[in-house]
Amino acid sequence: MSAPLAPDLAVLDDRFVLDEREVRIGNRVWRLECPRSVDDLINEADFERDERLPYWAELWPSAIALATAVNDRDGTGGRALELGCGLGLPALVAASAGFDVTATDYYDDALRFARRNAVRNLGRDIGTRLVDWCAFPGDLGHFDLVLASDVLYERRYALLVARAVVQSLAPDGVALIADPGRAALGSFRDACVALGGRVGEPRDARVEGCSTKREITIYEVRLG
């Protein structure tokens, strides 16, 4: 299924030592390329400026749980947005389900890996956008499905993510937020309600073959 890589994606072979993560979602095996060592990506200047760390380069259990939740949806004619896409697994599964996908992240390289993984697994590119939650763009439009996995690991992200979710939802849209009990979860839920959203009861998510000690839950957010 693999298609030729665009030059900006092919150059990742030269810039990184690559590894591959294999994960089964439903009846399909997804093979995601990623940097072999996350520690090698830590940049002291980036951290000093805004405490930026390369969390995007890991395939987190919450991303697998979220992708599993998306897998059975029919996205024909719908639009999907992923916030903090990292390697892109939920976005790729949404694209496979028929959604017109826009994957967003704070890191250019995360977007390149998401696109590269799309080409490797879907045979085509996906739409991406570099997004800073502190200055969330007003021209992304509205989406039938908004996705985010394990993005609430800093308390300051609660309001930022809530604003991004509520701003991005179409009137009948739904956001799926996968979370393993991070620090900002409660504040995020409160912020969604304050901004006009409605947060459903959490449901447990199972991740096959994952040894994580955290219980992952998925929350649905809709406009109130």
Image (tube, helix red, strand yellow):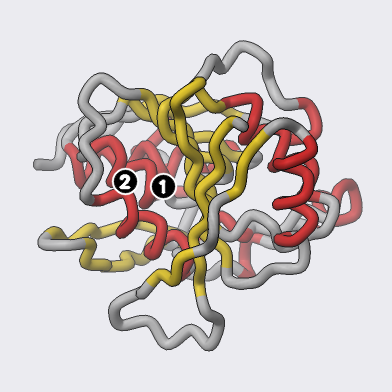
Q: Position of residue 210 (x, y in %)?
A: 38, 81
Residue at 56% x, 43% y is 221
Foreground of the two, 175 or 130: 175
Local SS, label 2: helix
Residue 176: x, y in percent? 48, 48
Distance of mark 2 from mark 1, alpha carbons? Answer: 7 Å
Q: Is residue 153 left or right of residue 214?
A: right
Q: Quadrant of residue 26?
A: bottom left
Q: Quadrant of the C terminus?
A: top right
Residue 88: image tag: 1
Is residue 195 rendered to the left or right of residue 223?
right
Around disc 1, counting alpha carbons within 10 Å, would you say few (fewer than 14), some (14 to 19), or many (20 or more)? many
Picture residue at 64% right of the left edge, 57% below the top:
54
Label 2 amino acid? Asn
Asked if the residue at tag 1 contacts the one at tag 2, i.e. Cβ–Cβ closer than 8 Å, the answer is: yes
| Residue indicated by mark 2 | 117
Q: Does residue 207 lie above or below 13 as drawn?
A: below
